[in-house]
Image (cartoon, rainbow, N blue to C red):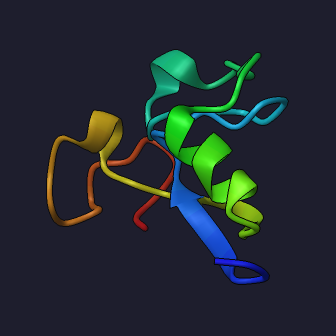
């Protein structure tokens, strides 16, 4: 994955970034650690460029139920 740019869903924690899982409940949560998948992507050389919106807590398939707008 060396040099491949990747964005991860907002369900995965990235140290120092807000992680909301598409929910108002977590609107202000800033992760103190990287999720395992994020750590492994970094270790493989991927370039993490940000996060993508999602249904609240990944409970859906249409991306229409995010607190922050449709994805």
Along the viewing direction, whichever of 16 and 53 lies nearer the viewer: 16
At 61% from the left and 25% from the top, the residue drawn is 27
Question: In the image, is 31 to the left or to the right of 64?
Answer: right
Quadrant of the snapshot with the N terminus: bottom right
Quadrant of the snapshot with the C terminus: bottom left
Q: Decide: is 23 above or below 42.
A: above
Question: In the image, is 29 to the left or to the right of 52?
Answer: right
Q: Position of residue 9 (x, y in %)?
A: 48, 54
Q: Decide: is 39 above or below 1.
A: above
Q: Quadrant of residue 7?
A: bottom right
Along the viewing direction, whichever of 48 and 27 lies nearer the viewer: 48
Q: Decide: is 4 above or below 53.
A: below
Along the viewing direction, whichever of 41 and 24 lies nearer the viewer: 41
Q: How many marks?
A: 0
Q: Position of residue 28 (x, y in %)?
A: 70, 20
At 51% from the left and 45% from the top, the residue drawn is 37
Q: Decide: is 31 above or below 40.
A: above
**Furthest residue in direction bottom, as rendered:** 4
Q: Position of residue 39 (x, y in %)?
A: 66, 42
Question: In the image, is 35 to the left or to the right of 66?
Answer: right
At 19% from the left and 66% from the top, the residue drawn is 62
């Amino acid at each position: 994955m060396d040099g491949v740019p990747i964005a991860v869903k907002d369900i995965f924690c990235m140290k120092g970034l807000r992680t909301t899982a598409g929910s108002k409940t977590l609107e202000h949560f800033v992760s103190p650690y990287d999720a395992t998948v994020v750590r492994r992507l970094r270790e493989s050389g991927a370039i993490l460029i940000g996060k993508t919106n999602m249904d609240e807590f990944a409970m859906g398939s249409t991306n229409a139920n995010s607190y922050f707008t449709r994805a």
